[in-house]
Image (tube, helix red, strand yellow):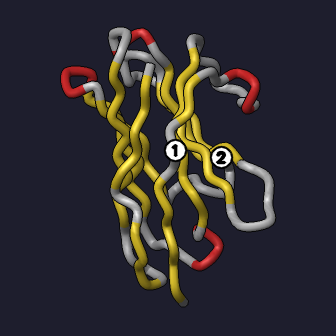
Amino acid sequence: VQLAESGGGSVQAGDSLRLSCAASGRPFSDYVMAWWRQAPGKEREFVAAISENGGNSTYADSMKGRVTISRDNARSTFYLQMNNLNAEDTALYHCASTWAYHGGKYSEREFFSWGQGTQVTVSS
């Protein structure tokens, strides 16, 4: 599956953004989809994941309450709504796909397709 992110940008602290990830290739509904992010000088970290049919989702503790992951299988697209952004959210955000949903802690090794990323920059 090929993935392409969009929706990043430069915003002020407290603003909101919605990131999108469009998929092409195998049927989109076959995949668990997730968002990861990597800030300058830091390791890539998990943000959120959503099950194949969108019925289940899991979030990093640091993001709970401020982000919502969703998907539209008819459009082969999934989203990350981020609210009340702060400077620590500045990062390159990647979407990724894997096969099996679980509600536990995800590792990068579980994901086999990655997008190029979309930059989010938050100014305080």
Q: Identify the residue at horizontal 37%, vertical 39% (top origin).
A: 21
**Quadrant position of the N terminus in the picture:** top left
Which of 53 and 17 lies nearest the eye of the viewer?
17
Residue depicted at 65% across the width and 73% down the height = 88
In the rendered structure, which amino acid carries the disc numbered 2? Answer: Ala
* Of 116 and 7, the residue lying toward us: 116
Disc 1 residue type (three-letter): Gln
Residue tagged 1: 116
Question: x and y percent of residue 53 in the render?
Answer: 36, 17
Between marks 1 and 2, how big is the CA–CA gap?
A: 21 Å
Q: Quadrant of residue 17?
A: bottom left
Asked whether 113 or 18 is in front, the reply is 113
Horizontal and vertical percent position of residue 81 = 38, 54
Q: Secondary structure at mark 1?
A: loop
Identify residue for label 2.
60
- Image quarter of residue 103: top right
Mark 2, secondary structure of its residue: loop
> Is 121 above or below relative to 41?
below
